[in-house]
Image (tube, rainbow, N blue to C red):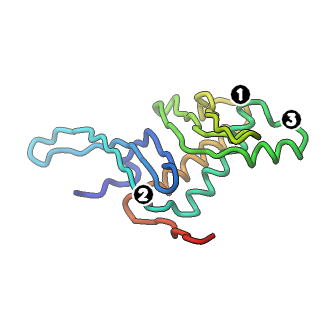
Amino acid sequence: MDIPKKEGINYETIKKLDGTGLEVKYTHQVSSEETGEVFTIETKVKSTEPIHQDLQDHFVRLKAILLRNHGYDNLAKKHYEKLLDSIEVTGVLLSGSEESEGCLINGKRTTRTGNVIALNSERIRFDAEDYGFEQDLQETCAKIETEAYKFIFEHKVGVLVLFP
């Protein structure tokens, strides 16, 4: 199988697996050498290899954006930090064309009682200025896409720590 060019991949979902690993769904186009016909290939890759810290750091960066999307950015610093610590971003769902590209951030929050609840953003368009963080979100998603490419095609993975 030929490795698709990074620029030719259209990512749909990039999400962390429970425990360790990554699941990535993407499409890319290939053309027939015989007929020149162009085909779109949809691929879903699921790996339990640990993700690299660079990719993890980009997911962590989205935690603050997820909280701001829910209106929690005006809390007192002590409460905000505590809430931020209780959240884990688990993935991004990317959609739209060039004119309407955007994403939905998937996450979960662990409550004081230990229950885990889903915490997802609405779909946020990169070209909008509703929140003021859209450009930062777009840049972070682009970095996540780059790291996902490296994870899949260049085997850039993390180190599994057995005894932290």
- Which of the two discs, 2 and 1, labels the residue nearer the N terminus? 2
- Which of the two discs, 3 and 1, labels the residue nearer the N terminus? 3
In the structure shown, which secondary structural element does the residue marked by tag 1 occupy?
loop
Mark 3 = which residue? 74
In the image, which disc is placed on residue 48? 2
Q: Is residue 45 left or right of residue 118?
A: left
C-beta proximity under 8 Å, tags 3 and 1: no
Mark 3, other Cα within 10 Å: few <14 / some 14–19 / many ≥20: few
In the structure shown, which secondary structural element does the residue marked by tag 2 occupy?
loop
Separation of disc 3 and disc 1 at Cα? 16 Å
Q: Nearer the viewer, residue 140 or 163?
A: 163
Task: Residue type at mark 3: give it.
Answer: Asn
Mark 1 = which residue? 130
Q: Nearer the viewer, residue 86 or 7?
A: 86
Q: Residue furthest left?
A: 34
Task: Residue type at mark 1: give it.
Answer: Asp
* Discs 3/2, front: 2
Residue 49 spot, x, y in % from top left = 43, 61
Mark 2, other Cα within 10 Å: few <14 / some 14–19 / many ≥20: few
